[in-house]
């Protein structure tokens, strides 16, 4: 089956450390820590784990003098661990002061995130924004102008509402707010360029927590500029809600070729791993055929024909094991990330799906002979039985990858 390729919206490419965002570069997956940045040991450890899971950029909050002072230490710790993931500093309210007080922080970061709604008020706003851009220019760092619905520039909004009220046919409030979001991002980017930041040092984002509003904002943004766009549904929420809403919003945009980097903002559930947002981001891109990260396990949902939950556990085990191998395998076996492995629960769809996968196993359903045929490249190669089917199948997958 041939699929229509996704035509990406043309953007300039921006270099963030060793990662390119925009242009012809693949859509980049990024994430953010939730440790106290002032705690360099824990923050470096979480950055390392996120990078290991596949986060190509990691953002850390820089909200205090202690946090800013910890940034060079975090960078050094990561370098020592052999992790070169670029770090992005997330600044609100006091970024100008922190960069001035700790120039080593300005140097150690690969990009600054600036929220135009949280830079200051009145005349100070421009001065403080200009000060941050001055550091970006001095240290040759890109910035993300990240507008957020929850912290929209109130002065700009008030002015636009005032102008709107003077129109013969005023726009609905929602329309004015939509325009204010875009205007905040685009006028701040224009100002950054006025202050000397090159065009190819700017990435934009315009986040909302509402799916349709987000889609509209990014569609319009992509028509009005060629800056790379950072996609993310803000405050997406917990569990399946966060995943589903983020996937719904981002998939529409990515399918239309909009978006150069993505971050899935999931509210962590107790004890859940922070890396989950990275995995969800990768899976969205892989599902759309934009990138491949890990061999995909095809597994049926199971039904009344399933003899036990054995196959679900095997599917989960294989997917987890494949993911674990990827940091080494991706260099050792180029292309392995595109392969598929089927783990199926009975004879109804088991052999068919297993034959379509690179390697697949059809486990016995209820009432079937307790044997599990294995297929490689569409051909049955062996039939497993007994208590060690899981281990034997895992060994066969490993041999297949090596071949
Ligand atoms: Fe049920 Fe078999 Fe289909 Fe799996 S493959 S969902 S066990 S009928």
Image (spheres, rainbow, N blue to C red):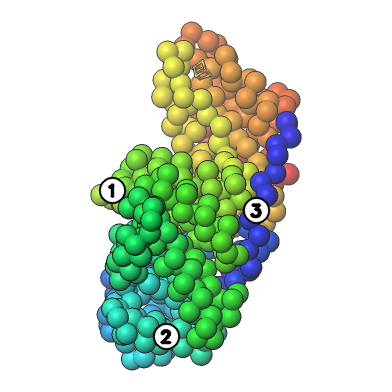
The answer to the question of whether label 2 and label 3 lie on touching residues, with beta carbons closer than 8 A, is no
Q: CA distance from mark 2 to mark 3?
A: 32 Å
Side (left or right) of 89 relative to 391: left
- The secondary element bearing badge 2 is classed as helix
Between the residue at mark 3 and the residue at mark 1, the CA separation in whole angstroms equals 34 Å
| Dot 1 or dot 2, earlier in sequence | 2
Q: Secondary structure at mark 1?
A: loop
* Image: 240 above or below 64: above
Which percent across, then down, holds residue 116? 38, 72
Of 166 and 77, the residue lying toward us:
166
Q: Check the picture and name the quadrant holding the C terminus.
A: top right
Name the disc covering residue 130, or none.
2
- Can the viewer see residue 357 in this picture? yes
User: Would you name the residue on which mark 3 appears?
Assistant: 8
The residue nearer to you, when weighing 57 against 343, is: 57
* Residue 239 spot, x, y in % from top left: 33, 42
Residue 329 rendering spot, x and y as whole percentages: 62, 54
Instruction: Categorize mark 2 by other alpha carbons within 10 Å: few (<14), some (14-19), many (20+).
Output: some
Q: Which residue is mark 1?
A: 269
Q: Earlier in the sequence, mark 2 or mark 3?
A: 3
The answer to whether 6 is drawn above or below residue 88 in the figure is above
The N terminus: image quadrant:
top right
Q: Is residue 78 above or below residue 152?
A: below
Residue at the spot 55% in from the left edge and 11% down from the top edge: 369
């Amino acid at each position: 089956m041939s699929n229509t390729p996704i035509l990406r919206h043309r953007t300039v490419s921006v270099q963030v450390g060793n990662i390119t965002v925009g242009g012809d570069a693949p859509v980049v997956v990024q994430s953010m820590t939730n440790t106290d940045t002032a705690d360099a040991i824990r923050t470096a450890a979480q950055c390392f784990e996120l990078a290991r899971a596949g986060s190509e950029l990691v953002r850390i909050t820089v909200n205090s003098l202690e946090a800013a002072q910890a940034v060079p230490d975090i960078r050094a710790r990561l370098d020592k661990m052999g992790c070169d993931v670029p770090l992005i500093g997330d600044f609100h309210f006091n970024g100008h002061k922190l960069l001035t007080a700790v120039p080593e922080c300005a140097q150690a970061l690969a990009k600054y995130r600036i929220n135009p709604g949280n830079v200051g008020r009145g005349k100070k706003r421009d001065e403080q924004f200009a000060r941050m851009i001055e550091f970006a220019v001095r240290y040759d760092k890109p910035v993300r102008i990240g507008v957020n619905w929850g912290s929209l520039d109130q002065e700009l909004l008030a002015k636009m509402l005032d102008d709107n009220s003077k129109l013969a046919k005023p726009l609905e409030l929602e329309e004015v707010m939509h325009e204010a979001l875009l205007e905040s991002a685009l006028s701040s980017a224009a100002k950054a360029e006025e202050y000397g930041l090159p065009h190819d040092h700017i990435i934009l984002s315009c986040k909302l927590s509402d799916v349709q509003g987000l889609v509209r904002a990014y569609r319009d943004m992509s028509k009005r500029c060629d800056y790379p766009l950072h996609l993310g549904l803000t405050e997406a929420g917990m569990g399946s809600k966060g995943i589903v809403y983020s996937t719904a919003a981002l998939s529409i945009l990515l399918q239309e070729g909009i978006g150069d980097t993505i971050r899935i903002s999931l509210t962590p559930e107790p004890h859940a791993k922070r890396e989950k947002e990275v995995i969800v981001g990768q899976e969205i891109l892989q599902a759309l055929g934009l990138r491949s990260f890990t061999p995909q396990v095809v597994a049926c949902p199971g039904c009344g024909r399933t003899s036990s939950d054995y196959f679900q556990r095997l599917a989960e085990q294989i997917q987890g094991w494949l993911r674990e191998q990827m940091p080494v395998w991706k260099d050792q076996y180029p292309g392995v990330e595109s392969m598929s492995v089927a783990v199926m629960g009975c004879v109804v769809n088991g052999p068919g799906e297993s034959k379509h996968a690179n390697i697949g196993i059809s486990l016995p359903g209820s009432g079937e002979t307790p044997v599990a045929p294995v297929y490689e490249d569409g051909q049955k190669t062996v039939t497993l039985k007994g208590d060690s089917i899981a281990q034997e199948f895992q060994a066969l997958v490993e041999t297949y990858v090596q071949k």
